Amino acid sequence: MIVDGRVLREDFVPSEVVHRHDEVTLLSETLEPLVYGGRPDPAFLFGPTGVGKTCIARYTLAQLCEQEPTVRVAYVNCWQEYTRFRVLYSVLEAVDRAVDVHRSTPKDELFDRLSRMDDQPIVVILDEVDQLEETAALYDLHRLPHVSPVLIANREVELFASFDDRVRSRLHAGTRVRFDRYGTDELTAILAERASKALEPESVGNSQLRTIADAASGDARVGIGILRSAARRADREGAESITAETLEAAIPDARTAIRRKTIDGLIEHQRVLYDVIDEAGEIEPGDLYAEYERRVEEPKTHRTLRNYLTKMVHYDLIEAVGERRGRTYRLVDGPGEDDGEQ
DNA sequence: CATCCACTGGAAGGCGAGGGCA
DNA sequence: TGCCCTCGCCTTCCAGTGGATG
């Protein structure tokens, strides 16, 4: 049934986009100075998850590179690369200048290397830039005249609040491209497009694509995930097409797969905290720390636990209800035992 | 109302890892 | 080889905040 699995992967960039023409146009207009050797304003892409921000950024830049092959593109996911060092390193890596950089290489050396690479313009896509812990990295990039940043984040207000004054004033002038949630019709069209490339013809009907789009409630990443796991299920069962039953089974799969992936990325101590919160349903910090200490051989200090917890809140795994005294922690979707495997 | 207490999160410094250099 | 560097992670210390308590 699956002809081309790549099309259903999260990082797939389609050769043409569905329903995002205005956004593409605005972004490519912003980047247009690159074509005649100018420096574009910084660009911001704002919107909730699964609305195509990353996809559109990559698509637009791929187009631009076709037109202007001297432009180099560095894609940095600030979720993983959240320090100044790692951001600079990723950019160098993308332009093949990361050889013999080691963790003892001073950050200033990385910066110097980048500033010497000014023969070709570099566009740096900073995805999930609200996860960046050292905004000095943005200041660095801004100081380099041949580097143009494209920043992707959920919400403008929160993002700017996390900047220090220096960065805020410099990035204030950028172009904002805003993305709204997809409607069911739009998402159905996107899924149809993907299905036509990824699957054999007639594998999935339009009403089923609608069901998927509904279940994904505007989130294309979830929608494509459902389609992927439904197709895999059907393949495993040797079916010729995706039935309503397959679909019903695939929907919870895809939802938990995304969450599970994040949980797998937690280190052991964070995992213990997560489990305690999961079992308790809702728990106060004091009890949480105490229970953690009971379960672990060599417990970390409370301060470190607080760092872990804020990180897990960022990951959207848990939420902190209330501020300071009287705060409680709980899982984001409430406690739920689901054993859908990836 | 004053005081206590639980909790948060910033700042600074220690430490081991991994690599450069004489 | 031994010393030095920077990194990230962790701890220690602490100020700030606001609910609870007398």
Image (cartoon, coloured by chain):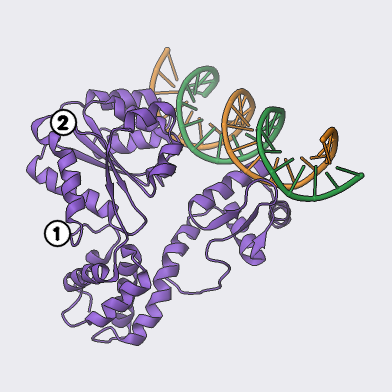
Chain colours: A purple, B orange, C green
N-term-proximal mark, 1 vs 2:
1
The image quadrant where one finds the N terminus of chain A is: bottom left
Mark 2, residues whose alpha carbon is within 10 Å: few (<14), some, or many (≥20)? Answer: some
Rendered residue at 18%/32% (across/down): A121
In the image, A164 versus B21, the foreground residue is: A164
Of the pair A307 and A6, the residue shown nearer to us: A307
Write down the residue under mark 2. Answer: A120
User: Which residue corresponds to the image point at 20% horizontal and 75% vertical from the top-left?
Assistant: A199
Residue at image point 14% right, 58% down: A15
Q: Is residue A181 left or right of residue A204?
A: right
Closer to viewer: mark 1 or mark 2: 1
**Mark 1 — on which chain does it sit?**
A
- Chain designation of label 2: A
Q: Secondary structure at mark 2?
A: loop
Where in the figure is residue A124, as x and y percent of width and height? Answer: 26, 38
Work out whether residue A321 or residue A6 is closer to the camera in this orientation and state it.
Answer: A321
* Residue A186 visible in the displayed image: yes
Residue type, label 2? Gln
In percent of width and height, residue A58 lies at 22, 50
- In the image, residue A290 lies at what x, y percent? 73, 53
Numbered badge on residue A239? none
> Which amino acid is tagged 1?
Glu
The reply to whether residue A59 is in sight is no
Give the label on residue A16, or none.
1
Q: Which image quadrant for residue C2?
A: top right
Quarter the C terminus of chain A occupies: bottom left
* Residue A45, horizontal then vertical, whole percent: 29, 46
* Quarter occupied by residue A191: bottom left
